[in-house]
Image: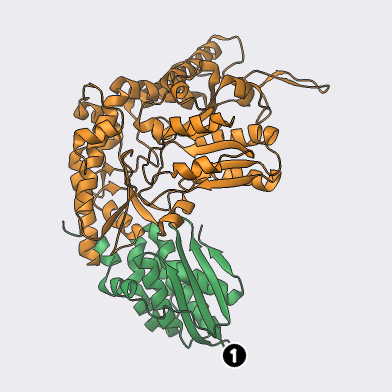
Chain colours: A green, B orange
Amino acid sequence: MSMADDLRDLYQEVILDHGKHPRNFRHPADANCQAHGHNPLCGDMLTVYLKLDDRHVIRDVAFEGKGCAISTASASMMTEILMGKTEADAKAIFDAFHHICTEGDDAAIPPEFEEEADRLRVLSGVRQFPMRVKCATLAWHTMNAAIAGKREVSTE
Amino acid sequence: MTSTSNAAVKMGQKTNAPPYDLERVRRDFPILARRVFGKPLVYLDNGASAQKPRQVIDTMRDVMESDYANVHRGVHFLSQRATDRYEAARDKVARFIGAEVREIVFTRNATEAINLVAASYGRAFFERGDEVIVSEMEHHANIVPWQLLETERGIRLRVVPVDDAGILRMDVYASLLGPRTKLVALTHCSNVLGTVTPAEEIVRLAHARGVPVLLDGSQAVVHRKVDVKALNADFYVFTGHKLYGPSGIGVLYGKYDMLAKMPPYQGGGDMIRSVSFAGTTFKDPPERFEAGTPAIVEAIGLGAAVDYVASLGHDAIAAHEAMLLDDATRRLSAIPGLRIYGTAPEKAAIIAFTLEAAHAHDIGTIVDRAGVAVRTGHHCAQPLMERLGVPATARASFGLYNTLAEVDVLVDAVKSVREIFG
C-alpha cells in the first residue's frame, strides 16, 4: 500500500525519531514548576517540568508521559528548543508554533525566532489532520500552564 | 482459534438461520457507497454508532412529511397519527426484546436510561452505606451515574474485576453480593473487549439475595437476540443509534412492578395526570418517565430500525458477525507486535488492539487515510484501560453490513502503520 502524501508529511523521519527516542524524557529533581497535561479525547497524558531561574530563564525543561508519535515528538522537540530561553521567548515561540500548526501563516513568525520556527515546521503536517492539532500542541499548552503556575491543563 | 462455525455456535446464536444477501443489505445503507479520501468507506466504528438503512431514513422522512404533530395532545387528525406511530414504535421495541409495551420507557440514550434509574430508583431506595455492584469493564455511562449517588447518598460502588482474557470474575461477583447490595449494574457486552457476560447467571445470583439487576445492553442488543423475560433482568437499557436507528433515542426497559414504585425522573408535561398548586399527580409508567415532548421522529425511526434488524434475523446477523470476528481476529493476530485485548470465548464482533510500534491515535489517523474508520482512545472506559495497562487502544467494531473484503482492507491498513513506524 503506498502512503498518501499527507501521511508522509505528517510522519516525517524526524518526527518518528523524536517519537521513538524522545529527548529530555525525564523528571529533573530540581524542577521548580511543572504541570500535568491531558487530552481527554485520546487519553494522552504528560507532565512538563521546568527549572526557571530568578531571571525567568529556563535552565532545564523535560517531560514524561504517554502519548502518540505526534504529541511525544512535539514535546521532545519543545524541550530542545526551549532550553536556555526566557519565559517570554517560550510564549512567543508557542504562539509561532500554534500558527504553524493551524494557519501556516509565516508573517506571524517573529524574525528573531525564525530558526526555531524552521525546526518546528516539520510538525506543520498536522494542518491536514485537524483532529491531531491538539496532539501537537499538548506539551506546549502544558508548558504554558507550568509557567503560569497552573498544575493541570486539559485540551478539550 | 475457533473455526467460523464454532465461533457462531459459541455466540449461542447459530440455528438454521438462512444467511442474508449481503450485497442487497449493503445497498440498504446509502452511506456505504460513499468514498473517504478517494477510497471506499470501510466503516468499522459500529460500536460507537452504526449507519442507518434506507428503511429508517425513509420512515423518519415520511413521518415529517406526512404524519407529524405533537403526541398525546390535541384531538386533531395529525396528532392522532403521530401518537399512533410513536406508540407503535414502543410496541415494536417491546416485542423486539420480549417485554410488555408498558415496560418500555423512551429516553434520549442509554446514558439517560441509567441516569433515570439512578435518579429515580436510587434516590428513592438507596441509603448511606448501601452498595451498587458494577464491573471494571463498564462504559462511563454505567459508572458515573452511580458515583454521583456515592457523593449525594453515601452509597458505595463495588467493582467486579475482569481476568486477563476480559472475562468477568464471577467468583468475585458472587462474593461481593452482600447484605448491603442494593443493585447490580453490569454490562451485557463490553464495548471494548466484546466480552458477553453471563447475564442469566448474574441475575440468578443477585435475585437469590433479593437484589435487582440492571443490564447495559447497548452493545449486546445489536449483536444477539435479547429476551428480557428470559434474562429476568429488572432493568435493561440500550440506545437507538448503535442499533442502526437514529441518535437521540434510547430505551429503558423496567419490570412493571419496579417502574410502578419509582418516583418521576423529570417533571413537566405529558407525565402528569393533573396539575394544581395544591398537588400534582403523575401518570403511570411509562408516561410517568417521559416528561415533555419526546423524540417523536427518532422513536418512530427506532421502530423502523428494530423491524429492519428483525427482518434479517438475529441468528443470521450473529452468524455473519461471528465469521467476520473470526477472520479479523486470526489475521490481525498474525501481524507482528499486534495485541488484541479481550479474548473471551463469548465475544461480540469487537476487536480492541494495540501495536507495539505505534500509539492508537497514530493507527487511527493512518488507517483513516485508507478509508477505514476505527475508534481510537479510551472508548469511554478509562478504568478498563487502566486495568489493561494501556492509555488507549484502536478498536474495530463490526456490523451486519461489513464484509470479509473489508477485513482485508483493515489488515492491509494496519500493516501500513507498521511500515511507517518500522
Q: Is residue B60 above or below residue B128?
A: above
User: Looking at the image, which residue sits at the far left?
Assistant: A1
Residue depicted at x 24% and y 46%: B329
- Give residue B3's position: percent from left, percent from top: 19, 38
- Locate residue B213: give its quadrant: top right
- Give residue B202's position: percent from left, percent from top: 47, 34
Residue depicted at x 67% and y 48%: B151
- Give residue B190's position: percent from left, percent from top: 41, 42
Residue depicted at x 44% and y 45%: B169
- Locate residue A3: give its quadrant: bottom left
User: Looking at the image, which residue sits at the far right?
Assistant: B278
Q: Is residue B7 left or right of residue B158?
A: left
Q: Is residue B220 above or below residue A143?
A: above
Instruction: Give the total of numbered labels.
Output: 1
Q: Residues within 10 Å of mark 1 (few under 14, many from 20)?
A: few
Q: Amino acid at mark 1?
A: Arg
- Locate residue B170: give its quadrant: top left
Q: Is residue A78 above or below residue B104?
A: below
Q: Is residue B109 visible?
A: no
Q: Say which element carries label 1.
A: loop
Q: Nearer the viewer, residue A114 or A147?
A: A147
The residue labelled by disc 1 is A55
Q: Nearer the viewer, residue A123 or B164?
A: B164
Q: Is residue B17 above or below residue A69?
A: above
- The chain holding disc 1 is A
Quadrant into which the N terminus of chain A falls = bottom left
Q: Is residue B314 visible?
A: yes
Q: Is residue B106 left or right of residue B311?
A: right
